[in-house]
Image (cartoon, rainbow, N blue to C red):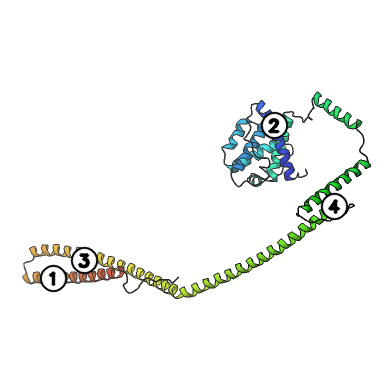
Amino acid sequence: MALTVPLDVCMERLSLKIRALRGAGQASGIAAPPPVPRFYFATAAGDQQQLQAFVQTAAWLLQLCGRKQQQLLSLQTLPSPQALQLLVGEARATLSQPPEAQPGELQQGHGQAVCTLLDQLAEKAMQQLKFQWQSPQPSSTRIEQAQRYLHLEVTAEPYTEEDAEQQMQASDAALLEEADRLEQQGMFELQLDEGDSTWQLDLMLLKEDTAKLQSLASEALQAMNTLQQEVAEDLQALRAHEDHLNEHCRPQLAELQALNQHLEALKQEEATQQLACQQAQETAQQLNQEVQQKKKQLQVLTSKVQDTQALTRMQEAVGKLDGELSDMAVHIGLLQHHMHSLQAPPATHSPVGIAA
């Protein structure tokens, strides 16, 4: 099992290989994908363009490895799951030891699995193109210049300890002279002996800076504590105001809930009355049809029957039916009036206002 290369090292190596393969791919007539940043496949970009760039780069490397170009061009038109499955299959057919990468890991378009797969495909493409790394060869002019500088260093006089001591003494003298000049100008007070060295001045300045930073840190800490206390007080006041609003609006909310329940009950009653009215209208229509049939039968019987008493009884029956129809019409009118009264908004309830 191959060792896992760190992600940053793998991406660094991959970027160098892709940069080297661009020229070889253009020479062979294979168009390279658009360039991406150096660590593009190592971190998440948060969009679908990263997955598309991964598929395009992998398809380009597979073409450099000698795979079928027409089948690889269809990767850009297929949906992401199918394209990744085809890509994994082509990689397994191309590489002798393909990485154990699942389509779910490649679906993200970044990470260890993506960089490892691209790195192995790039290595295979370089082997297919017989690419060889070569060290840069300097020109003859640069070689002569380097030899000349080397000769000067060899023939120069050696740097002894006496030279180093003289240079240190000169530096100390220059430091003392600069300190005297600044002290005369009143910028700071500094007392140094002739035997003091530069590290004492650095230590003094460091102590002064440390004292200033400590004073500033204490002031900043005090300001932060004050700010934290003020924020806690404001938060407590906000919670108290919220509790007050909830307590003040509780009766209005209860009344609003009761009104909503009453409104729902009225709507249900209205629906029931509408159903009863519809049934009454259907019954009245049926009775009207029966009356019309009875009238027709009465006309037929009137033309055939000679007995006046039977005709009188029939006329009385028809009169009773007319009376029943009148009563039914009155009942329907009362139902319609009741429905209209239910549909009208109640005049007793006033809108609820919530105090600020």
Going from N to C along the chain, the mark reached first, 1 or 4, is 4
Q: Residue at the location (85% across, 30% down)?
A: 149
Q: Give the Cα separation between the discs numbered 2 and 4.
A: 54 Å
Report how far apart the C-alphas of labels 3 and 2 lie in the structure: 96 Å
Going from N to C along the chain, the mark reached first, 2 or 4, is 2
Q: Are marks 2 and 4 in contact (CB under 8 Å)?
A: no
Q: Which residue is mark 1?
A: 319
- Give whichever of discs 2 and 1 has the lower sequence position: 2
What amino acid type should be assigned to the residue bearing mark 1? Gly
In the picture of the structure, the residue carrying the numbered disc 4 is: 199
Q: Say whether residue 193 is left or right of residue 104.
A: right
Pick the residue in front: 217 or 168.
Answer: 168
Report crowding for label 4: few under 14, some 14 to 19, many 20 or more residues within 10 A (C-alpha): few
Residue 98 appears in the rendering: no
Q: CA distance from mark 3 to mark 4?
A: 121 Å
Q: Secondary structure at mark 4?
A: helix
Q: Tell me whether the residue at label 3 lies in contact with that at label 2, contact meaning CB atoms closer than 8 angstroms.
A: no
Which is closer to the viewer, label 3 or label 2? 2
Q: Residues within 10 Å of mark 2 (few under 14, many from 20)?
A: many
Q: Amino acid at mark 3?
A: Leu
Residue found at x 16% / y 65%? 294
Q: Position of residue 13 (x, y in %)?
A: 73, 38
Secondary structure beneath dot 2 equals helix
Q: Which mark is residue 287?
A: 3
Give the spatial CA distance, label 1 vs label 4. Answer: 132 Å
Up the image or down, 145 lies above or below 159; here it is above
